[in-house]
Structure formats: C-alpha cells, structure tokens
Amino acid sequence: MANPSILILAGDGIGPEVMAEVKKIISWYGDKRGLSFDVSEDLVGGAAYDVHGVPLADATMAKAQEVDAVLLGAVGGPKYDVLDFSVKPERGLLRLRKEMDLYANLRPAQCFDALADFSSLKKDVVAGLDIMIVRELTSGVYFGTPRGITTQPDGSRVGINTQVYTTEEIRRVARSAFELARRRNNKVCSMEKANVMESGILWREEVQWVHDNEYPDVELSHMYADNGAMQLVRRPKQFDVIVTDNLFGDVLSDCAAMLTGSLGMLPSASLGAPMANGRPKAMYEPVHGSAPDIAGQGKANPIACILSFAMALRYSFDQGAEASRLEKAIEKVLADGVRTADLMGPEGGKPVSTTEMGDKIIDALNASL
Ligand code: NAD
Ligand code: IPM
Ligand code: MN
C-alpha cells in the first residue's frame, strides 16, 4: 500500500523554523517506527507571493486537495502589509480552509504540569486543564457578503463585513463538538452573542436542535461569548468542549493559549468531511502566527507545530498510540526543565533554541523505545 501523503506548507516568519523540527520528527517515525510518509513541500503566504504573485498558487491548492494531510506553519509578516488585500498572505490560508471545506477547527488547550507555574494565572486555576475549543472555520464574518470598503457620495468611507450562518453550517460543526465531547467529559458549551446578533440566535437554536435530536446524552449549555472570555480566565476547568463561530473562536483560542503558558504551545486540526478512505480532509496548523518579532532568531517554540503533527497522527493516520508517544515525549522534555524563551518565567534561566528543543524531543522519543 502507498505511504500516506503529507503536503508541508511552511509559510513565512517562524513557520519554516518550527516546521524544520516537525520534519525531523517525521523522519524519526520513518526510521524508528516504520511509519513512512510521502512528504512534499510547497509555498504559501508571503513566500508564495514572492514567487507566484499570489499567496497560494492553483497548483498548490490542487495538491492540498489530493494529499491525506496538509501541515501548515504560519503566514504573514510586515513585509506584506502594503499588498492589496486580495493577495495578502492570510488570503492563502483562508483559501485553503474554504476550498478544502475544513469547517471544524479543533484547538485543544492543555496545561502540561511542568508549565502550570508558568501560566499568567494562578497554578490551581490551570493545573490539569484540558479543554477543546471547536471553532467554525469556513463561514461567518470571515466569508460573509456583502463585504468591502466603499466610498460614499460625501467622500466618507464605509468598511463592511457580514456575519452569515446557515442551518447546515451550524449543525455540522455542532455535531463535531458533540462527537468529541462523547469521547471526553461529555459536556459542550456553545458560545455566541444571541443577545445582539440574529446569527447568534440561529446558532443557539440549531446547536440546541442537534443536541435534542441527535445527542441528548451530552450535557449542553449556552453562554454569551463575552462572558465566555471572562469565564475562560476565571475558571477555565469548568469547560470540556466549547463550540463557537469563526471570529469568536479565533479570539477565544488565543486567550486559551495563555492558559497553557504560551501561544507557542497551542496546536490545531482543521477537519472537513470524510474522504473516500474514511479519514477527514485535514490541515494541521499551530494556532500562532509568523511571529515577526522573533523570526530568524532561532527563538521560536516549535511545540505547537509538533503537537499539530501529533494531531495528524491521531486524526488522519489512525496512530493514536504514536500521537500519545509524541505528546509524552514533549511532556518529559518540559518536565526536565527544557524551555524556549517564551516559556521562561521571571526566575530566568537559559532558554534553548528552536533546534535544540526539537533535538531534545527526538532524544525523548528515542528514550521511549
Ligand atoms: P503571532 O501569533 O505571530 O505572535 C504573537 C506573539 O506571540 C508574538 O510576540 C510572538 O513572538 C509570540 N509567539 C507566537 N508564536 C510563537 C512561538 N511559536 N514561539 C514563541 N513565541 C511565539 O501573532 P501576530 O503578531 O498578531 O501576527 C503576526 C503575523 O502572523 C500577522 O501577519 C498575522 O496575520 C499572522 N498570523 C498568522 C497565523 C497563521 O498563519 N495561522 C495565525 C495568527 C497570525
Ligand atoms: C488563526 C489566524 C488566522 C485567522 C489569520 C492569519 C487568517 O489568526 O489561524 O488563528 O484569523 O483565522
Ligand atoms: Mn488567530
């Protein structure tokens, strides 16, 4: 049987730096676990713009549609701020999500014991934290029309974006959340702003409908998203699975990242409908961006990107045990006190580089055999 295929799109800024460490891990699995992948690489974001004049070439889009999984680093950077909106690096990422129809973005926030002291919140608030944010990824205000910037007859300008959700778009992501909850602690909290948005009213009604008709065994609650943000920092362990729209999910997941200690720790899986082989169409991407402030300095934490590969092992390649092996290796390295700069507390110490962190994780993988 052919090896499973992976398309790597490292992108911009720290994207290629953190992805280099993932490539080492992929090779390790081929060498040591007999798990070989057909890996190809291509350009996305500013890197693609520099070569093709667009942030995602059609040929790259076509490849992404064919592989078993896409691994994405990060896109964007100040160099591209001046570009026309239609060719900005971020448009490449949004095109991938939309055309692959990756509607369920799983953003787990887990606090490793070794980092509980390091969170900006008190240790007992975050120790043992394990929540899953399910962010709708292909609709909402990111894609709704009308949109744009128009000039009025008096010369003033208007910027327009529109939040649009259909019944089916809400129901399918709600199902993803309920399915996940059944394999976790059986609780879903749905977040919107039904108090001010009609799309929020529909969101609440449709999530409730899916619950009542298909998942009555799962505990469901509803919360306004602003309160949700407050509750996430007040008592995050009250949550199991959170399901929310594209924009609220973007903001709430960055917030959840800090509960784990650093944005450099948070992975994600963007999943669509099952392909012919039964596995979901999928892209794996860290939650963080291209971090222009530290790019090119060997300071980036590669763990979010490596944990995203662990999610690929679990959700695309049916290798749950190997995913756990990788997660445990990371846990061990952190327990040994190995830290990239973003994980240094006020007590200081000497941070390791991106490459050294990758090497330490490989050492821990070797020790796991
Ligand atoms: P960012 O996530 O790039 O950085 C925010 C802060 O977190 C910075 O201080 C950065 O140094 C730090 N940080 C992020 N990842 C880190 C890591 N792995 N290790 C250590 N520190 C890390 O967000 P931003 O600065 O708002 O955006 C920069 C660019 O990235 C923008 O162009 C934005 O559009 C883009 N972006 C891309 C993605 C993506 O590709 N998925 C996600 C978010 C932002
Ligand atoms: C993310 C990012 C993206 C988003 C940008 C870069 C398009 O912030 O993946 O969280 O807003 O979805
Ligand atoms: Mn974001």
Image (cartoon, rainbow, N blue to C red):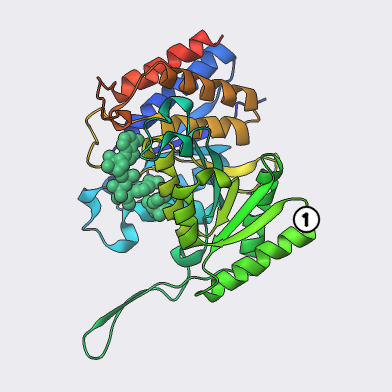
Quadrant that contains the N terminus: top right
Quadrant that contains the C terminus: top right
* Label 1 Cα crowd, 10 Å radius (few <14 / some 14-19 / many 20+): few
Residue at 55% across, 71% down: 194
Q: Position of residue 73 (x, y in %)?
A: 39, 38
Amino acid type shown at disc 1: Pro
Dividing the picture into quadrants, the one containing residue 37 is top right
Secondary structure found at label 1: loop
Q: Position of residue 255 (x, y in %)?
A: 41, 48
| Above or below: residue 332 compared with residue 49 | above
Dividing the picture into quadrants, the one containing residue 356 is top left
Q: Is residue 57 visible?
A: no
Which residue is farthest bottom?
153
Label 1: which residue? 216
Judged left or right of residue 220, residue 22 is left
Q: Position of residue 142 (x, y in %)?
A: 44, 63
Residue at 68% across, 50% down: 178
| Above or below: residue 202 compared with residue 329 | below
Residue at 52% across, 33% down: 6
Residue at 44% across, 12% down: 363
Judged left or right of residue 219, residue 22 is left
Q: Position of residue 157 (x, y in %)?
A: 26, 80
| Above or below: residue 71 compared with residue 52 | above
